[in-house]
Image (cartoon, rainbow, N blue to C red):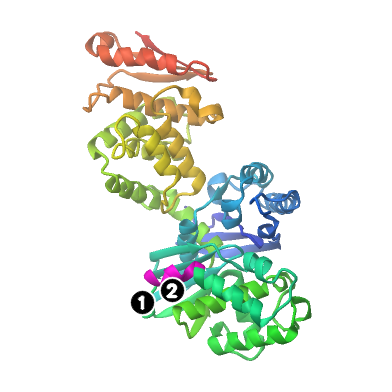
Amino acid sequence: MQNGTLLAAVDLGSNSFRLEIGRYDHGHIARVEYLKETVRQGSGLDADRNLSREAMERGWACLARFGERLAGFPRAQVRAVATQTLREARNREEFLSRGSEVLGYPIDVVSGLEEARLIYQGVAHLLPQSDERRLVVDIGGRSTEIILGRQFQSEAVASYRVGSVAWSGRYFPTGQFTAEAFRAAEVAALAVMDEALSLFRPGDWDVAYGSSGTAGAVGDILASLGGPAGVIERAGLDDLYARLLRAGSADRVRLEGLKEDRRAVIGGGVSVLRAVFDLLDLKEMQVAQGALRQGALYDLLDREQPSTDLRGATVQGLMARFSVDAQQAERVAVTALHLFHQAAAAGSERRARKLGWAARLHEIGSRISHSDYHRHGAYILDHTDAAGFALPELHQLSLLVLGQRGKVRKLGTATDDPSFALQLLCLRLAVLLCHARRDPDTTGLQLQQQGALFVLHLPKGWAQRYPQSAHLLQEEAVAWQKTPWEFKAALE
């Protein structure tokens, strides 16, 4: 990463969409521009967890405006991250397809734990370097993340489905503030988050930080009332609660520091924040400047090199957890990448890295079933929390693992993508060539792509030396029938 490089992060939150543009300079990212729009997508989920057309239209319009600002940014320098609302939405693919198109960049839906990790990275990078033990709490629109860490390393992460938008809609639907409504909201929040005490015990941290919208909004209000800047004290939070009760409704609240875009969700936000203070026995909370979007920016730096890409370490961890045969996994990875580099276009390094991960995880399901290990492996990858990975990335790995054997057409439209088709073929060929669980003889093997045709050229005498492998290659040609692609093994 060259000094002066511009990086951008788009945070698709449940209440607001944010765009952060920063300039890289000697390991740090300085803000160049920040845009925020209140979209309230989280309030657009119906009882069946489908996003309304209106909510999608609001989101698309905002992303189109962000896309105009980002025009010309290389894809590797932009990260768009979606959180709880799109994790929940049953029709999220419709929104993501159009949203990625108007934004001009793919949108990653991240798991709650990955969101928590990114939040901590954002907070930690904007704090002075210190060895203090940090508790970070981020109350978003539909989820709350709690993280315990030190310096840049998060040690415990959790995500709970409780937030300012969801709780405002559920407990303050007409904007009326009563003691009974607050009590119900806080009890419900405590019920959702009570398991946090098994991970976050009072005394495990030196300083508590609050990041993102709710903490920032409450901090601004309390400072305007004469409290210390950048600090949320329990006494001040209780005073704010009393003022909301006296106002009686969100419309009648008159508080300096309360921005209009927070008015409709202040009741839900305060109730969740009070529940967090009660649950974790907090006396005060520092308002942090960093948040998810800054974490996504710094994650772009880490992803640039294999040595700093957290996803590589996560793959190794999954291999160990599921007792993967490391020698066979590495053998298949080396073979798959050897073939991939022969046929792939220049600039396919990131695709190659993902193929290597899929190859190292191709037997992750073997601990469950030998005969159907590819199906179990795909299920594991689709349902695991994997640090550093977005949900679409895990799903693509799961498709590669599922497609490593059997008919290719079972993957449906996934193989319409030429890059994915090449990754899949290279993985299948590597598994095939390594069937004896020893290093295959790839001397003279040459994979080429000619339009929709993949050809594996075999050197003279290879088929006679390895008759089983040659037979499996002929079966491979059959497996690609009824797909947009054709494969054949050609004898020299």
Q: Quadrant of residue 105?
A: top right
Q: What is the number of the mark on residue 135?
A: 2
Q: Is residue 221 left or right of residue 303?
A: right
Q: Nearer the viewer, residue 10 or 328?
A: 328
Q: What element does badge 2 sit on?
A: strand
Tag 2 and tag 1, C-beta contact below 8 Å: yes
Residue type, mark 2 in image: Leu
Can residue 102 be seen? yes
Residue sitting at x 35%, y 46%:
315
Q: Nearer the viewer, residue 402 or 216?
A: 402
Residue sitting at x 65%, y 50%:
48
Label 1 environment density (alpha carbons within 10 Å; few <14, some 14–19, many ≥20): few
Residue 194 counted in the magenta span: yes
Majority secondary structure of the magenta segment? helix
Give the extent of the magenta segment: 192-199
Residue type, mark 1 in image: Asp
Q: Nearer the viewer, residue 12 or 159?
A: 159
Label 2 environment density (alpha carbons within 10 Å; few <14, some 14–19, many ≥20): many
